[in-house]
Image (spheres, rainbow, N blue to C red):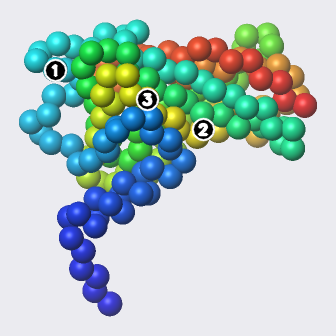
Amino acid sequence: MKYQTSEFSMRKLLLSVTLLGITIGGAACMMPASKDTPRNSSAGEIIQDGEIKFTLIVANDKKSNQPDAKIAITNESKQVFRVRFDSDPLQYLNLIVRDADHKRVSSGYYGAMFSRFGRERELCLKPSEHCEFNISLFATVEEKDRKPGNYSIQAVYTYDGIKYRSNTVNVTLK
């Protein structure tokens, strides 16, 4: 069976799939990337670290040992913040998990879990816009290392040569 589709319906399908688990604040756009679109600039200005805010949000779920979490990205700059991706905007995310002794227990890279689309897409956040992505706080920690105790977790988002760091959250596994 052969399927035919239009560029619009494919864009809508990919947008629907990509937005699964994402809350967009404002009118953020997610679309195919253009070669002519600058990555993170407007009239030649480069967005500096600190103008894009990454926040870890944790909600302790009484029913589960592992809390629900989100990463929020807020554009506090005066330019559009653009992230080009070929799998998921979180392909650039890593979670650094440390135990109570400050020993790093996370391994691997959070963004490595996403499959490639094969076609580049773009997340755009206009000034003051934000978006939230559901994440698994212990996805980079092997099962054998998930022991009861206190952990500190920080998100590090590396894109276009800039490392953005979130707040550090403290979580207790029982």
In this view, the mark in front (1 or 2): 1
- 10 Å neighbourhood of mark 3: few (<14), some, or many (≥20)? many
- 10 Å neighbourhood of mark 1: few (<14), some, or many (≥20)? some
**Helix, strand or loop for disc 1:** strand
Which residue is label 2 attached to?
Answer: 135
Q: Which mark is residue 108?
A: none
Q: Position of residue 87 (x, y in %)?
A: 38, 47
Q: Position of residue 127 (x, y in %)?
A: 32, 22
The amino acid beneath tag 3 is His
Q: Nearer the viewer, residue 41 or 161?
A: 41
On screen, residue 78 versus residue 152, left or right, reads left
Going 90% across and 31% down the picture, which residue do you hit?
Answer: 174
On screen, residue 17 versus residue 162, left or right, reads right
Which residue is label 3 attached to?
Answer: 130
Q: Nearer the viewer, residue 37 or 152?
A: 37
Instruction: Determine whether 5 is above or below 134 in the image.
Output: below
The amino acid beneath tag 2 is Ile
Disc with the residue nearer the chain's start (3 vs 1): 1
Q: Position of residue 27 (x, y in %)?
A: 34, 38
| Distance from Cα at disc 3 to Cα at disc 1 | 18 Å
Q: Which mark is residue 42?
A: 1
Q: Position of residue 56 (x, y in %)?
A: 60, 24
Disc with the residue nearer the chain's start (1 vs 2): 1
Q: Quadrant where the N terminus lies?
A: bottom left
Q: Nearer the viewer, residue 23 or 39?
A: 23
